[in-house]
Image: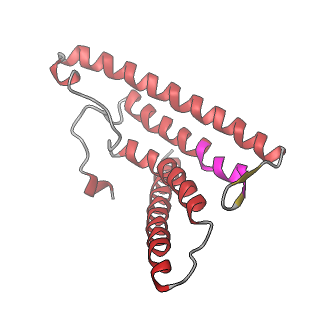
Amino acid sequence: MQVLSIAHDWLIHTFKFIAGLIVLAIFVLITLDVLLPLVGIQPWDGTLGVVEYGLLWFTILAAPWLARIKGHVFIDAVAVMLPPAVKKVTAKIAYLVAITGSLMLAYYSWLLLVESYVDENIDERSIELMLWWIYAPMPICFALVAIEFIRYLIGIDDMYGSRTDVKEGM
């Protein structure tokens, strides 16, 4: 079981690192796209497409890590006013909803991935890319998000407990 936990942690942190690299690449591409015309050089036509893919990918890849460090967006204004017993029940309901939603997204993104791979669909923007590449990280990352909420559900951690300092999660 400890091997699975280590592999799970490694995968989440690897995806976080890749997401950071994607953000850096987006920054460089946009900067070059703006600055190159100033010196008379035609920028790459594929910048917009790559940036669009990058925005999707870094969001998906960072999601499990954000769920782990409680960096995702949620409103706890009502929860802080509830008695502890009621808060615990509502938290369990919230975890079940998040798990269900994440697993549904993992399932349907898996179906889209398989269908686009089998049909050899191509996404045509400023660059052509096999459509399954766009869907590739989605089933894995949504499943990892579900696992994070399962951790909350079974009591390994608590979403409404003290929030993890983002610096510690990095």
Can residue 3 be seen at all in this image of the molecule?
A: no
Could you tell me which residue is drawn at 36 percent across and 35 percent down? 156
Can residue 92 be seen at all in this image of the molecule?
A: yes
Above or below for 16 versus 99: below
Q: Is residue 113 left or right of residue 98?
A: right
Q: Is residue 70 left or right of residue 28?
A: left
Q: Which residues are magenta?
A: 129-138
- Residue 21 in the image, given as x and y percentages of width and height: 47, 66
For the residue pair 14 and 157, the one nearer the viewer reads as 14
Residue found at the far right of this picture:
119
Is 125 contained in the magenta span?
no
- Residue 40 in the image, given as x and y percentages of width and height: 52, 84
For the residue pair 35 and 74, the one nearer the viewer reads as 35
For the residue pair 53 and 58, the one nearer the viewer reads as 53
- Residue 159 in the image, given as x and y percentages of width and height: 31, 33
Assign the magenta stretch its main secondary structure: helix
Could you tell me which residue is drawn at 25 percent across and 19 percent down? 87
Could you tell me which residue is drawn at 62 percent across and 66 percent down? 46
Q: Is residue 124 left or right of residue 47?
A: right
- Residue 93 in the image, given as x and y percentages of width and height: 39, 18
Q: Quadrant of the C terminus?
A: bottom left
For the residue pair 74 and 151, the one nearer the viewer reads as 74
